[in-house]
Amino acid sequence: MDYTTYRSPFSARYASLPMQRIFSEQHKFETWRRLWVILAECEQALGLPITDAQLDELRANITNIDFDAARQHERTLRHDVMAHVHAYGDVCPTARPIIHLGATSCYVGDNADVLLLREGLQLVRARLVQVARALHDFAWRHKDVPVLGFTHFQPAQPTTLGKRACLWLYDVLCDLLETDQVLDSLLPLGCKGTTGTQASFLALFDGDVDKVLELDRLTAQAMGFERSMPVTGQTYSRKQDSRVLALLSQIAQTAHKFSNDIRLLAHLKEVEEPFERSQVGSSAMPYKRNPMRCERMAGLARFVISNVQNAAMTAAEQWLERTLDDSANRRLSLAEGFLATDGLLVLFANVASGLVVYPRVIEQRLREELPFMATEDILMHAVRKGGDRQTLHERIRQHAMAAGQRIKQEGLPNDLLERIADDPAFGLTPDELPDLLDPARFTGLAARQAEDYLSGEAAQILETYRDIPSPDAEVTI
């Protein structure tokens, strides 16, 4: 390993080997060669004079890539596609005359990109399924556990931990369904020629329109698609890239929200990300348990969310049938968008499957705030016993203000219940108050909503992905 030159953090730290392989040079140029084989096979099937020996030679050398030779050709030709045409021809002398026949550079460049995007999305989908399964299991185990709810990160009506986890799961499943939609919508360039008119292929087939159209259809089917993009310039519409990176951005938004929530809950000491026995939280403060995985998730998510602008600007700035200012940008934005999303989802699955819950802290915080939230029930109970609603409302307000001052200014426990019990206007005995403070009384339908969602819609969606195995995750976590 050479430590004297720049190495991308995506390959050194974040992205998994499976995703790195998809966007590797080896896989990219093998895909180019497979596309050249597809082109030659389809052209032969439609009557062009291409021999079986030439096709056999092409197939036998798909993986036999001499990168040094390709680099040398590119230094001379200043054209990456032609450099690889020549490098392929060097090892396929018999087939050399028919490599890239009738095609423009985008035949291999754009079609290969779509194939790589499809592979990347399939891996992203598998990782989303893994995250969803972990969140579903967590939510089911904790569907009945009352927790203090928060709005504006201020205490609010209680909910349950499982219902809160359902919020995370819902977003993940939305991303999962959207991933399928994007996968289903992907279309290759096909065989369209230099400006999308298929003129070069029309010349090859002596003006036979049906054969030109059939070539476009056959090559798309050989790539695993039902059809190609119906109209193009030299490239496929860059709107397709924009939609793919927008999907990755949505996934990153979901992951970022989850990571923020866990960081807040870790501060409250209610729920934490996994923390290994020998893990160091801080180089200076040995006691620290910093939420570094969730912080890393937030950092990667920020990159993916901002990366969508690359595809948006590229789609907006294309000129007429083709301009090359998309090339350098797409080499970065497409691959690194997937590598970052991959690393993000590996972390997401790791954290979601290893969340640590502290029930006593959760219960203690809930009980500290519960007296304030129970005042409406206490008011109704006292009115049913004959009290005056308006008078009792004012008495509760005064007691609540006094209890709040005691908590904030003196740092003492919440004594609102004791104040109400000691106030004869309420006619309540100390034995009656605990029944009014059962946390389950204040969570509404949270547990029911969680159970219905987890056993209903969420379970149905996950069932459709039951055959997708959990992918490998060989990264530094």
Image: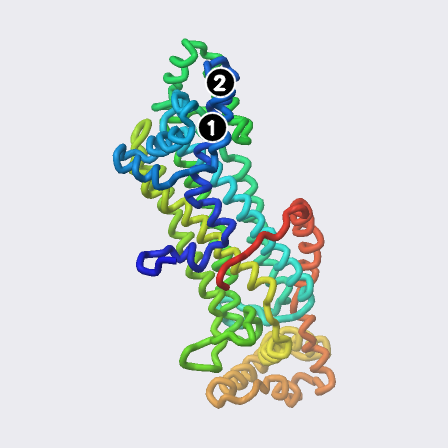
Residue bearing mark 1: 58
Residue type of the residue flagged with mark 2: Thr
Does residue 117 appear to the left or right of 327 in the view shown? right
Residue located 40% across and 55% down the image:
303
- Looking at the rendered structure, the secondary structure element under dot 1 is helix
In the displayed structure, 269 sits above or below 469; it is: below
Does residue 215 appear to the left or right of 167 in the view shown? left
Looking at this view, is 145 or 467 the one in front? 467
Residue 207 lies, in percent from the top left, at: 41, 9
Residue 327 lies, in percent from the top left, at: 33, 38
Q: Residues within 10 Å of mark 1 (few under 14, many from 20)?
A: many
Residue located 39% across and 21% down the image:
97
Residue located 53% across and 39% down the image:
183
In the displayed structure, 334 sits above or below 57; it is: below
Looking at this view, is 3 or 141 the one in front? 3
Residue type of the residue flagged with mark 1: Leu
Query: Can you say which quadrant of the picture contains the N terminus?
Result: bottom left
